Image (cartoon, coloured by chain):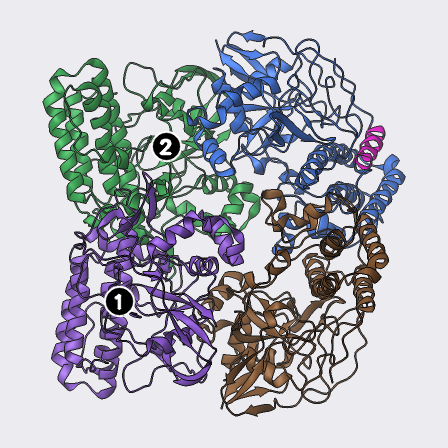
Chain colours: A purple, B brown, C blue, D green
Amino acid sequence: MLAMPRPLAALFAEVRARTVALTAPLSDADASVQSMEDASPAKWHLAHTTWFFETFVLRDHVAGYRLHDERFPFLFNSYYEAEGRRHARGRRGMVTRPTLDEVLAYRAAVDAAMEAAFDDLSADAQALVRLGCHHEEQHQELLVTDILHLFGENPLEPALFAPAPKVPVAMPGAMGWIESAERIVEIGHEGRRFGFDCEGPRHRALLPAHAIADRTVTNGEWQAFIADGGYRDPRLWLADGWAWVQREGVDAPMYWEERGGTWTRFGLDGRRPVDPAAPVTHVSLYEADAFATWAGARLPTEFEWEAAAAAHDPCGGNQLDTAGAVEPRPAAGGPAFFGDVWEWTGSAYRPYPGFRTVEGAVGEYNGKFMSGQFVLRGGSCATPRGHVRASYRNFFYPHQRWQFTGVRLAKDI
Amino acid sequence: MLAMPRPLAALFAEVRARTVALTAPLSDADASVQSMEDASPAKWHLAHTTWFFETFVLRDHVAGYRLHDERFPFLFNSYYEAEGRRHARGRRGMVTRPTLDEVLAYRAAVDAAMEAAFDDLSADAQALVRLGCHHEEQHQELLVTDILHLFGENPLEPALFAPAPKVPVAMPGAMGWIESAERIVEIGHEGRRFGFDCEGPRHRALLPAHAIADRTVTNGEWQAFIADGGYRDPRLWLADGWAWVQREGVDAPMYWEERGGTWTRFGLDGRRPVDPAAPVTHVSLYEADAFATWAGARLPTEFEWEAAAAAHDPCGGNQLDTAGAVEPRPAAGGPAFFGDVWEWTGSAYRPYPGFRTVEGAVGEYNGKFMSGQFVLRGGSCATPRGHVRASYRNFFYPHQRWQFTGVRLAKDI
Amino acid sequence: MLAMPRPLAALFAEVRARTVALTAPLSDADASVQSMEDASPAKWHLAHTTWFFETFVLRDHVAGYRLHDERFPFLFNSYYEAEGRRHARGRRGMVTRPTLDEVLAYRAAVDAAMEAAFDDLSADAQALVRLGCHHEEQHQELLVTDILHLFGENPLEPALFAPAPKVPVAMPGAMGWIESAERIVEIGHEGRRFGFDCEGPRHRALLPAHAIADRTVTNGEWQAFIADGGYRDPRLWLADGWAWVQREGVDAPMYWEERGGTWTRFGLDGRRPVDPAAPVTHVSLYEADAFATWAGARLPTEFEWEAAAAAHDPCGGNQLDTAGAVEPRPAAGGPAFFGDVWEWTGSAYRPYPGFRTVEGAVGEYNGKFMSGQFVLRGGSCATPRGHVRASYRNFFYPHQRWQFTGVRLAKDI
Amino acid sequence: MLAMPRPLAALFAEVRARTVALTAPLSDADASVQSMEDASPAKWHLAHTTWFFETFVLRDHVAGYRLHDERFPFLFNSYYEAEGRRHARGRRGMVTRPTLDEVLAYRAAVDAAMEAAFDDLSADAQALVRLGCHHEEQHQELLVTDILHLFGENPLEPALFAPAPKVPVAMPGAMGWIESAERIVEIGHEGRRFGFDCEGPRHRALLPAHAIADRTVTNGEWQAFIADGGYRDPRLWLADGWAWVQREGVDAPMYWEERGGTWTRFGLDGRRPVDPAAPVTHVSLYEADAFATWAGARLPTEFEWEAAAAAHDPCGGNQLDTAGAVEPRPAAGGPAFFGDVWEWTGSAYRPYPGFRTVEGAVGEYNGKFMSGQFVLRGGSCATPRGHVRASYRNFFYPHQRWQFTGVRLAKDI
C-alpha cells in the first residue's frame, strides 16, 4: 500500500520542477505581492526553498561552492530572527528586486550546482536534500493557497486557470461511522522513512471508544448549517470563536459570497457556484467546532484520525499532481482519508512523549510552534501527492482558513 | 485523607462570609475600579456571586421571591451575551453606582432569603447551592489576584495587608524526581463528590514512562535563569512566547523589579525583596516552558500531574484560610502538590473523552473556553482551602500571569 | 459692561469652594474612576488643582513650607513628562489610594496654608495665585463634563442631580444675521486684566465682509439635519470627519439615543427627552462643519466671532454658578455670545503673531497644544461665570465632543 | 517673469509623456506594490490619471466614446466612496492584474482617443483637459516619492537611477532675513490662469511685521540640531509631535541612518552620505516646528511666504525636468523660493474667505481635506517644472514626511 521511497535524485528533480511549474502563469507582480502577513509572495517561496539547498547542502557540504548572491541569504532566510522593521515577516512583499526572472535564475544556478554535486554527497548531505524536498513540498502548498488569497483580494477576482472539467457525481450518501472500541494503538512515524520531527517518537496511546465519520462534511451540509442560523447562535461556538465571528463579521466559509440568492466561492478558476456535493473547505477550527456541535458530534482527536487512516493509501485521492485549478471534489466510492481537504482535529499541536528538538538551525523547525495551534490531518487537493502520511501533522491557528481546510466528524460511543 | 464533603449550610455560610472578609479592607473606590480587561472590580465579584444564588436558587426555586433590584441581573450577569459598548467586559469598572455599601446590602438580603429558604430546598436547588459555593470560591481567588493587580497599577504601590511573619526556612534541596513506568491510569473526577463538568468523565489514560519533580521551581532558580540570559535567547522560547516577550518587553516575572541590584516583587503587603527559597510565581506558560527548556526538562502533562498528585492531601499546604498577605512560601518537608502556586502543565485545555456540555445557562460554564488555553493544576495560596482536588482543572491563556502561577518540571525517562 | 477684576482672596476662596461643592454628591468610587483617556477622575482634578498652589505658591514662595505628602507631586503633576506605564495619562483611574477623603484633607491643608500666607505674598506669588484660580476654573468645567461622561458609561445611567425646573420658552425665531463689511479689528487680550498666554499678543487683523448668526443652532434644527440624512451623506463632511463617522458609527450628537421614536439625551439629571428649543450640544467639529455645509453656511473664524462678541457681556447668559444639572437652555431675548455652549470656530488653534511661550514649567501651558486642534469660543453652561472673555480661546481636537460644544453659523457676503 | 500659459495640446502631450518616462525603469512588480497606505502603486498613478481624462473628457464630452475596459473605472477611481475591504485605499497593491503593460496600453488608447478628439473639444472640455494635466502633474510628484518609499522598504535598498553628478558648491552662508513691516497684501490666485480651487478667492490679508529667511535650512544645520539633543528634549516639541517622536522612535529625518559615524540618506540613487550643504528634506511639520523653536524662530505663515515669494520666478530652481535621481541640491546664488523642498508653513490648511466647493465630482477635490493638515509652499525637486505658483497650496498631515519636505524659518520683528 505504501509507495516505495522516492529515489533522491528523481525526487529532487520532480520537486524542483513542480515549484516552477506552479508559478508559470504568474507575472512578476503576481509573484512579488504579499496579500497578508500570513502569506508570502510566490517569489519568496521560490527563493526561500532554493536558499535551503544552497545553505545546508551546497555551502555546508560542497567544497568551494560560492554563493550565487551574497545578499540573498539575508533576504530569504526565514530562520534568522532578523531585527528591524524592514525585515518583519509582513514586509516580504516590499522586495520587488530581485525580480522574478532573477529568482528563477537563482533557482537554475543552484539546481545546476546541486546536479553537479549530487553523486558525491555524503549521507548527511543526502538526508538534508531529502529534508529540503519535503520542505519545498510544504511551500508548494502554501504557494498555491497564497496565490489564491492574492487573487481573491483583487477586486476583479481574476481566474488564474481554466476550471477543471466537471464530472457529474451523485451527492454523497448519509455519513457512515467507523466504530472503534477502547484500545491501545501505536501513534507516530515509525522512523525508517522520511518524517518530520514532530511526527515522532512513535509511541503507544489509549484510544477511547468512539466512532469517526467515513467522509468529510460537504458544502451542502454546510449550507444547511448556515440556513439554520449556525453563524448567529453563540451557544454553538467556542468563546474565542464567537469573539472572532463577531469581530470579523464571519457568516460563511472564506471566499464564499451570496450572489443573487446563490452561494458562490472564489477559486483558482475565478468565482463560481458552490458545489453542494464537494467537501466544504476554507473553514476555521472555530467554524469546524461549531458545525460539529450543531451536528451533535465533535471533532476527532488526532490519534483517532491516525488510527482510522492508517489502513488507507496516503497517495490516493484528490491531491496535487500538476498546476491547475485544484479544489476539493465530490467523492466517488468508499471511505477516504487523504486529499481534498486538511481535516481539523480537536487536538492542540503539542509534542509527543519523548519529543526532542534537533540541534542546530534545521531543528528550530517545528517545536517552537507548539502553542495555540491545532493539528490538521490528511492532506488536501493542494498537497503534492506523495508528501503526506497517516502520521503527518499539519498545524494552524484556530482562526486561519486560507488553506484548504475542512471537517470530519467523530463521536463518543 | 480526603475530608468529608462539607455540609451544605455550613459551606454556604463559610463561603459567603469569606468573600466579605476578603473585601473588608477595601474602600468604595478600591472595590469599583477595573485595572485591566482580564480583571473585574471586587464589587462585581461580590455582586455576581450573589446574583448566581438569587437567580438560579431563589428566582427559580423559591416561590414568591422578588428580586432585590430589577436592574441587577442586567449588571451582574456574566453569562448573558450582552450587546453594546457599555456592557463590554472591559467596562465593568464604569459601574460606580450601586456603591459598595449597596452591593453589601444586596448580599445581606440574598443571604437572608437563602437562610429562610434553606430547609425547604429541593435536591436540585441544593445542587445549585453547592455549585454556587464552588463558583464563589473561584471568584474569591480572582478577587484576591484582581485586587493585587489593581494595587500594583497604583504608582504608590500601597500595601493592603501587613506582611506575614517570616519564618526562617532553609533553601529547598536539589529537586527530586518521582519516576513512573508506562502505565494506564484513571483520570478525572470520580463523580460522587462535587466536581466541575470539565473534570469528567473519569476515563483511562496511558501515561508514558516519565519523571516528575517533587517540588516547584524557586525564585532562586528563576534568578539563575534570568542571570543566564533566559529572557534574551529566542532558542528557549515558543514562537508565540518570544513574540510576547518582545512585544511586552518582558524580562522577569510579573510584579518583579530590580531596585538597587536586588530583585523585589510587589505583593499584597507592598513591595519587598524576592525570597529565593519561595516558589516562583506570576509567570506565564511561555516563561514556564522556556524555563523548562533551559533546565533540560519539560512541563508535565496534566495526566502525569494528576497521577502523581492523587496520593496527596488536596487540603494541605499553603492555601487560603483567611484574608491577608497571602503569597507562596518556602516549603518545609517532603513532596507537596497542592497550594502555593498553580502549576502550568503542557496540556492544552480540551474536553475529556465523552465530555458533554450541561443543558441550560449553567452549562455554558466551562466547555466554551476549550481553545487556546492551557491547564494548570494544584491550587495556590489564594485558593480557598477545600476548593481544589487532584482532578481539578484550572485554565488560562499562555500569556496570562496575574494569577499565582508557577512551574513544576517533568522529563522523559 | 466688564465686571471689575475679582479681588484675589475672594476669588481664591470662591474658586476653591466651588470645586469642592461640585464634587459634593460624588462617592469615593465616582471620584476615582477614569471613564476614558481624555477624561480624568474628579479626585485627580481636586488634587491636581491643589498641587498647583502647593508647588508654585507655597513651595516656591513661602519660606519653611513643608509638603503635605511627599508622594503627591509625583501623582498629581500633569506637567511632568513622566515615564512608564503606570504614569500614563490613561492610568489616572488606578489611584484608588489616596482616597477622596484624603484628597479633601490635602485641599484643606493647602487652603489653610494659603490663607496663612496670603497677606505676605509677593506680587509674583499673587500673580501665580490668580493663574492658579483660572487654572482651577478650567478644571471645574472638565470635572463637570468628565463626571457626565462617567455616569453616561454606567449602564444604569444614574442621575447625579434633580432636573432643573423647566421654564416654558417659545422656540427661537428664524436665525438673524449680523453683517460686517471688510474691516481691520483688534484681536486678542488687551493685557491689563488676567488672560492666558495664548490669548495674546493683541494685534490687528483684517476681517473679510461676512455675516454671523445671532444665535446658536438648536436641537430642533439638528433633528432636521438628521432627518434629512445628514449623517449619511459623505458630500457634507470633511474627509477626516467622514472617516470618523464611519469608524465610530456616529449618527447623532453624543449622549443622544432614539427611544420609542423620540430623541433623548443623557445629562446630569439622567436620560430625558431632547428639548428642540435648546442649543444643540455635544457635537464634534466634524459634525458642526457638516451641519454648516448642509445649511449652506460655514463656521465663523475665531476673529469674526471675537469681533462680534466684543460688545457683549462675558458674564451674562447661562454659565456655571452652582453645582447642579447644568445644561444648555432655550434662549429668551436678543443675541447672546456667552454661555450655554462652546462654539466651534473654523480656526485651527495656532499662535498669534508675536506669541512667545513663557519660560519655566508654567509656560508649557498652552503653546505645545497648537497643532491639530480647533478653537472654540464663548463658554458654556459648565464654565464658571466670570472665567471667560471675548478673547478667550478654548481648543479641542475635531473629534472630541464630551464638552458642551455647539454651533454658530456664519457666511460670506 | 511668469511664463506664458502652456498651449493645451502641448501641455497634454508633455505631461502624458513625462508620467510614462518616470515609470520607465520600473518592473511590473515595482509598479504594482503599495509600500504603505499613504502611497499608491505607480501602476495606479498611471491608470488613475488616465481614468480622469477618459471619464471627464472622453466619456462626458466625446460622442460615441466607448470605455477601454468597463472594469477600470471601478478600479482606478479615487473619488468614488467605495465600500468593502477589497476597495480600501490600503489595498491598491493587491491589483496585480491588469499588468503594467495592460495599463500602459490603456494609456496609449486613451491618449489616441484624446488626440483624435482634441480639435473638437468644447471650452468646458478643454478646461477639464487642463485640470487633468495639473492633476496628473500632482500625481507625478507622488509617483516619484512613492517609488522612493517602496525602494527604501526593500532591505537591499536598490538604486533606481545613477547618482546625479556632484557639482562642488560652497556651504551656504549665514541665513539672511527679509524684513517686512505690517502691511495689507493680496493673497491667492488671481484667476486668469489655471489654479486649483483652494488657491482662491484672491483676497486681502494683513501681514504682521516679520522677517522671513532667505534660504531653507540645510542638512548641516539639521545635524547640529540632532547633535544638540533636539530629538530628545520635549520642551522643543508640540505635544502631538513629542507623542509621535516617542511612539515612532524618530531620531533623524526619514531615510537617514548613521553608519560608521556618518549620516547617510536613502535616495533614488541608493544610500549615500548626507550632503551638509543641501536643504534638509523628509522632515515632518513636527520636526520643522521643533527645529524652529530650537533656533529661536518660528515657521512662516502661508501668507508671509506667499508675499515674499511673489517676486520670484516659480519656474526657477531645482524642479523636476526629467526622470532621474532628483534630490534637493546646495543652492548657489541669492534668495530662492521655488524648488528643492516643499516648505512647511505654520498655517493650518483651511479655506480662504469666500471659498466655495465646485459642484460635481471634480469639486470634491480639495475642500474636504481642510482639517488637520498644514500648508506647504514652493514646490520641490520632484515637482514638474511649471506646475507650481506663488499661490499654490500643498497640504499634508503634520506627521507625514515621505514627500520632499523642508523648512524655512521666520520670526517676529
Chain where mark 2 sits: D
How far apart are labels 1 and 2 at the CA level?
41 Å
Q: Quadrant of residue C104?
A: top right
- SS for dot 2: loop
Q: Which residues are magenta?
A: C8-22
Residues packed near mark 2 inside 10 Å, few (<14), some (14 to 19) or many (20 plus): few
Q: Position of residue C59 (x, y in %)?
A: 79, 46
Q: Which percent across, then down, holds residue A198?
A: 38, 77
Q: Is residue B205 above or below residue D117?
A: below
Marks 1/2 same chain = no
Q: Is residue D413 visible?
A: no
Q: Looking at the picture, does residue C206 appear above or below residue A38?
A: above
Q: Nearer the viewer, residue C41 or B370?
A: B370
Q: Which amino acid, by three-letter code, is at mark 1?
A: Thr
Left or right: C26 in relation to D258: right
Residue C11 magenta:
yes
Which marked residue is nearer to the observer: mark 1 or mark 2?
1
Query: Which residue matches tag 2?
Result: D81
The subunit carrying tag 1 is: A
Q: Quadrant of the N terminus of chain B?
A: bottom right
Taking the image as shown, residue B37 lies to the left or right of residue D309, namely right
Q: Residues within 10 Å of mark 1 (few under 14, many from 20)?
A: many
Residue drawn at the location 64% of the way across and 18% of the way down: C276
Q: Looking at the picture, how far across and down is residue D99, in whole percent?
A: 19, 45
Tag 2: amino acid: Glu
Q: Which mark is residue A383?
A: 1
